[in-house]
Amino acid sequence: MADNISAVTDAEFDSAVLKSDKPVLVDFWAEWCGPCKQVAPILDEIAGEHGDKVTFLKMNVDENPVTPSNYRVTGIPTINVYQGGEVVKSIVGARPKAAILNELSDFINA
C-alpha cells in the first residue's frame, strides 16, 4: 500500500516521533476505515516528494490504542504533525492532495 511511509507503534512513538529533530506527520488509520484508504496513497505521494523535510509515519489505531487515546484521536483518518514533542497541526478526515499540501506548507516549505 504505502511505500514511503513506515508504521509506528505505541512502543516506538516516543523515540520515533516525540524525540525526532524534524517534524513528524503521523497518519492515524484503521483497516476498516474507507476514508483512510483514500488518503493513504495521497500521503504516500507527498512523503515521496517531501520526505526529506518531514518524517511520515502511520499508526494503526486498532493495534496501538494508547497513543491515539493520549492525543484524543477520536475520528479517523486523523493526521497529526508533531514538532518538538508537541502536536503543531491536526487534520481530521480525508482531504484532497492540494488541501493536505496547503496544511503542511509551513513544514515542507521551511
Image (cartoon, rainbow, N blue to C red):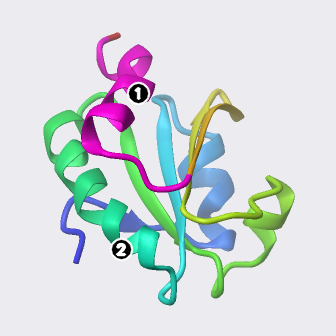
Residue at left offset 65%, top offset 86%: 62
User: Closer to the N terminus: mark 2 or mark 1?
Assistant: 2
- Of the 4 image quadrants, the one containing the C terminus is top left
Tag shown at residue 104:
1
Q: Nearer the viewer, residue 78 or 10?
A: 78
Where is residue 88 drawn, in percent x and y?
65, 27
Where is residue 13 drawn, in percent x and y?
63, 59
The amino acid sitting under disc 1 is Leu
The residue under label 2 is: 37
Which secondary structure dominates the residues rendered in magenta? helix
Residue at left offset 44%, top offset 69%: 35
| Distance from the alpha carbon under mark 2 to that under mark 1 | 20 Å
**In the visual, does 72 lie left or right of 75?**
right
Where is residue 98 drawn, in percent x and y?
27, 33
**What segment carries the magenta color?**
93-109
**In the visual, does 86 lie left or right of 80?**
right
Q: Nearer the viewer, residue 20 or 35?
A: 35
User: For residue 96, which quarter of the picture?
Assistant: top left
- Of the 4 image quadrants, the one containing the N terminus is bottom left
The amino acid sitting under disc 2 is Lys
- SS type, badge 2: helix
Is 31 colored magenta in this rendering?
A: no
Outermost residue, top side: 110
